[in-house]
Each structure stands twice: as C-alpha cells, then as structure tokens.
Amino acid sequence: MSDTTARIHTLRAAGTALVVELTEPVPRVLHWGADPGELSVDALAALALTAEPAVLNNSIDIPRRFTVWPTEADGWSGTPAHEGHLAGTFTAPRMGLADASYRPRAEGGELDLHLTDPGAGLDATVTYVLEPSGVLSVRTTLTRRADADPAPYDLAQVTTLLPLPRRAAEILDFTGKWSRERSPQRRPVGFGTHAREIRRGKPGLDSPYLMTVGVPGFGFRTGEVWAVHVAWSGDQRYLVEQLPEGAGTHAAVFGGGELLRAGEIRLAPGESYTTPVCHFAWSDQGLDGLAERFHSLVRARPVHPRSARPVILNSWEAVYFDHDLDRLLRLADKAAEVGVERFVLDDGWFRGRRSDNAGLGDWTVDPVVWPEGLTPLVDHVRSLGMEFGLWVEPEMVNLDSDLAREHPDWVLGPARGVGPSARNQHTLDLSNPEVWQHLLDSLDALVEKYGIAYLKWDHNRELHETVHTAADRPVAHAQVLAFYRLVDALKARHPGLEIESCAAGGGRVDLGVLEHTDRIWASDCNDPVERQAIQRWTGQLLPPELIGTHVGPATSHTTARVGSDSLRLATALFGHAGIEQDLTRCSPEELARITAWTALHRELRPLLHGGRTVRADLADEATLLHGVVAHDGSAALYCWARVATSPEGQYGRVQLPGLAPEATYLLRVRTEPGLPSFHQVSGPAWLSAALDGGLTLPGSVLTVAGLPMPNLNPGQALLLELRRAEEPEVS
C-alpha cells in the first residue's frame, strides 16, 4: 500500500460515503455523497490524483485544495472555517494536522482530526461520525492551550463546510411566520454566498430548518440532493457558497453553525468551545430519500420515545383563560369518552394569570381560581384513566409579576434598561445560577406535587439584546446551554416526564432541542389547509411521532376558515395526534366521529409512528398525496387531499409511492373521519368497491400505472388504507 492510500480514510453506510485524505498541512475531503463501493488501492490513488485541480490564470501558484478547515492559507477566498483574534493579533488562522484517529464500523464509523495553530495557542478536534442511517454528523471542539498567552482569544465564528458538485444547482430552504411555519422557497445556486442568519435567540419561525441543494427540479421522489441541518436551539447560520474558482475540484460548498454574537466566546487558556452538531445527508431518491435518512437517525437515538404516543387533549382552544373547575371537569369527561389518553391544562392556571399581561414567572397555582389547587382536576383526570399534563413558559417573565418585582436584575437586557416587550413579556437570564435554580425548584415542586406526566414548554418571544450585568455581557449561547441543562435536570429528578418543545408554535424545532425533549409543536395554527403544508415540510426532518398534530374546531382559531371534518381529522391523524377544541359543545354526531377517529389513530399508530414517510410529486399544487408505508411494504395509509380549486376537471392516474410492485394489496377507504365532498357525479369505478369492503389490486398497477383519483371539492380529504393481500394456499 502506498503512503498516499494509507493516509486515505473512508466512512461508508447506507449507500453514502465520506473519503478524507490526511494531506499536509490540513486534510482534504476527496469525496462525499454516493458510496463508490469498496475502493481498491489503485482506486484510492486515482481518487487522490484526480483531486488536484488546474492552476488558474492570475491565481495562487499551486492547485487550490478544499480542506476540512478552509482558510486563506489554502488560497480559499470563501467563508473560512473559523474567525477570531487574540487582542487584535493572530487574525490569519493557520491550522495544521497534529494526528488523527479512525474507527470504522460495519455501517459507518468515526474520524477524529486533531489540528493545531501554535501561534494563537489553539487546538481543534473535528469529529466526523457517519451514522448507520447514512447521515454524517460533524462537530468541532476548539481549545486554548493551558500554556497559551493569557489574553482571551475572541472567537467570532466557526463554520462546518462540505463540498458540492456542479450538478447541485438548486437550493431549497424555508422561511415562515407565526402560524405559517416552514414555508419552502427555491432559488438557483449562483456565484457568491447565499447565507441565512438567524438572530432570534432560537431557530425561530423563519428558520432555514434544513438547507437542501440538488439537481435542478428535484422533487420528493426524484433527484440527487444534499442537505444540512444545524442541531442548535439558538442563533444559527446556514450558507451555500460558489466561487468562480470553485472549491478544489468541487464546484461549491455548503454548511453552517452557531451564529456567535460579538464577544460571546472568549477563550482563556484551558477553555474550550464546542460547536453544535451539523448533520449532513445525501440521497439520490429525492426529498423522501433524505427524510428517510433523518427519520432513521432520529429514531435510533437512545432518548427517542419507545412507548405508544398517547392521544392528547390540550385545553387552550377549549377554554383559553377561563379556568372554571366545573367546566374543566366536564371537558375531561368528554375527553375520556372520545378516547383521549392525556389531558393537558394550558395557560391560565398560575397566580395572577387572567390574561397574557401578567403572572409569567410566578409558577404557583392561583389560589383565587383554584382554591384547592389543581388536585380536584388532576384526581378526576386520573380517575378517568388519563395522564395529566401542564403548560409552562419558564424562560419568560411578565414585568407585572411578583418575580420581576422582587428580582428585576433577573430580567435579561442591557444595564440601561430592558427593551420593548413582546407578547407582554421579557426573558429571564438562565445563565444566572440563581435564576436557573429558582426555575428548577419551581418546576420540580409542581411536577412532584401533581404527579405531572407531561409539560408543554412554551417560549413565545424572540430574544433581542441578549445581554446582562453592568457590562452588558452577551449570553445568547449560555442561555441555550442553560435551557438544555434545566430540562435535563428536571427530567433526571422525574424519570418518565415528557416535555414538548413549543415556541409560539413551531419556533424551536431542531435536533438539538430534541436531544432533551420528547416532541415538538409544529404550529399554533390548526387550520387543516395550512397544516397540510406545515406538517409536510416539518416531516422533511422529523418522523410523525415527534410532531404534535391536533384537530381543532371547524372554525380555525388562527385563520377563521371553516374546515370540513374529513380534512381536519385526516390531517391530524398523521403525527402525534390530539384534540384542541371544546368537546362539551360538540353534538353527539361530532363526538361519535371524534371517537371513531381516536380509535383509528390507536389502530394505525404502529404504522404511522414507525413507517416510512412518502409524498407524491404532483403537478397541481392544489392537490396533495402523502402517506406512511411499512418498511417491508406490507401496509400503507395515504391521504388524498385538495386544498384549493384547479383548472383540471379530471386529475388522471396518480402513482402511490412506496409500495412493493410485486405484491398484491387490499385497498380500502377509511371512513372514520367522514367521507369528503366530491366534485363529480360518480366514480372512479374502483371507489365504490373500496368503500364496500375493499378490492384487491396488484402493486404494479398502484405504483407504476397509478390510480385515477376521485375529484374532491376544496378543503376535503380521503384516506386510503392498503394491506398486503393474503396469498392463496397452494393445494
């Protein structure tokens, strides 16, 4: 084996591979993407040889290399791996390889690269972990040496970057606002930098979420795509960057990291900074291929929920701030009657909380509204066989609260005075140990006293001017770490406690927060037309069992749009299902339908919460087909939905993605949510049989030719269930 090939390390898993050469002074990425297979010595040597680009006119006089730590020392004119200075000096980082450790596995493996910059007294360890799912997770730790110059090193930015080929020419990322999270947006890759910077103290409703770059026109089922997600619950930075001279033999780069505020990370000798993990994934099977990789990654976590996700009723849209015990007892009765398994009391239960103007921070039960505490409600909920959950917003405070009056110095903000409120609230400084301990003790007391099984943990406002103390010390980074520690400490005291990440709806949805919590609230909007899009794109990263999906009343709280039963119930089925309406005002017919729906969810829960998410590529954006298919292709549930009108009178055949073409399936329409309103006189011909016990069809017809779909009126949905038909016995 040549010296060159001995210094090339390959991580392979699930059809993807990372190949790194330990070149001097800094290693370089030879390949990332499709697995080229087991490479021979000659192939490795050829890969290294072909990694040298041409030397361009009016350029540096050696071939440019794209390294694992790109800086100007490589002739790299793009975003550097890190920026910083030592009291205004050592502003040109020049890392060199110190050593490396390589731990391959049958599926994936780990590569640690240890780099050093003696001038700045910095050591860096870049860790690449290729998971069995094919997701590449990258983390970096920067450390000041103990014997370094005593002046602090001001770290401005650390960015994790990987290369992209020329054919990766279209970007998909997300924007959003309250009640319209994760709205997709596309654009071509151009020269320069497409950067998304999040300065909200949390990923926010405008989060890029998952930045994807692919061949032009990539869809759910087709196209080669590359993606990155920053697993961090604070300020973030994503970018795609293409320079005219390229990136070594690659065309462009992309990546991200935590967005650091000025002066936030100052490393004294012996101190370290560890970046959030950046998760990268590649697929040649479009967005569904990427989703399958990320869902497999998430489901493999030790902290992933293993028990059946209980059907929830959350009280907010049922009673709002009107906390009347008799009314809530009746609501609990109805919840148990329709099959709810977890009853959650939302905002309005604590001292002084009759609106959102006051009370945040005073986490004790209001003695005026609840003279006997929450015990009468909690005991009643448990007597009906349901778990009890509670809404909290520990990181926030109203200035009209005992806490703010007693401890004004606990409120986060500049020394000269806090800025404007948002949602009538300000932020507590969790980096202050006294604040952190107070919140832990307050929450611990509540969970202990009432045996709470679940906390809906909200975080409504965005964080601006995230500084404190007389010197206006920046604490945005410390705030996130303190939040993580607070959740972990509370769960350590109460094993089995589940916590939802809610942040004005879906404002804190990332794989960082899900290392500490058990589900996310995708949006405050339960309008099923909006939710179809919100859930479709939230599912690009997260599997359904982690996404709260509740059915609200017919008239939406956030849009005032009136929704049909079929669309409302079918939409909420595909996730961690729940109810967000006043059941005491429902007619017997409505209660019967909701009861049938919760039973359907429990029946299909193993499939919905364990299968592969699939989505069809349809030319008409007014129609949607999505579903969940068992990994062995034995079962599937699809939702055929129409959210608006469109020019076509006849939609034509639609392929059902994910089924096994060689299998035979029994197709049935599930009517528990109610039948939709059709925009047709009758048919298609298969529909009657599917409604009347089902019909058997070959998988090749379903997946290759497709089904002619019924024409629905806007705001309607149809559920199709498929089960592999029993094979006839051979005589």
Image (spheres, rainbow, N blue to C red):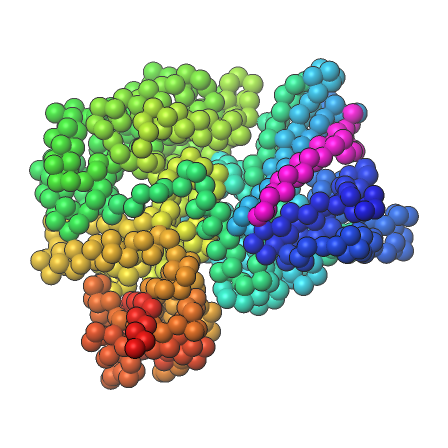
Residue 502's quadrant in the figure?
Answer: top left
Say whether residue 281 is visible.
no
Q: Position of residue 355 (x, y in %)?
A: 25, 35
User: Does the magenta portion include 117?
Assistant: yes
Q: Residue at x 20, y 55 (%)?
A: 599
Q: Is residue 159 left or right of residue 639?
A: right
Say whether residue 276 is visible.
yes
Which SS does the magenta portion mostly show? strand
Q: Is residue 349 left or right of residue 105?
A: left
Quadrant location of the C terminus in the rendered image: bottom left
Q: Position of residue 220 (x, y in %)?
A: 49, 64
Q: Residue at x 25, y 83 (%)?
A: 682
Residue 303's quadrant in the figure?
Answer: top left
Q: Residue at x 41, y 51 (%)?
A: 543
User: Does the magenta portion include 444?
Assistant: no
Q: Position of residue 319 (x, y in %)?
A: 18, 43
Residue 56 against residue 460 in the figure, above or below: below
Q: Is residue 160 left or right of residue 231?
A: right
Nearest the viewer among 453 and 347 is 453
Nearest the viewer among 306 and 463 is 306
Nearest the viewer among 125 and 568 is 125
Q: Residue at x 25, y 74 (%)?
A: 694
Nearest the viewer among 357 and 363 is 363
Extent of the magenta region: 90-118
Residue 400 against residue 544 in the figure, above or below: above
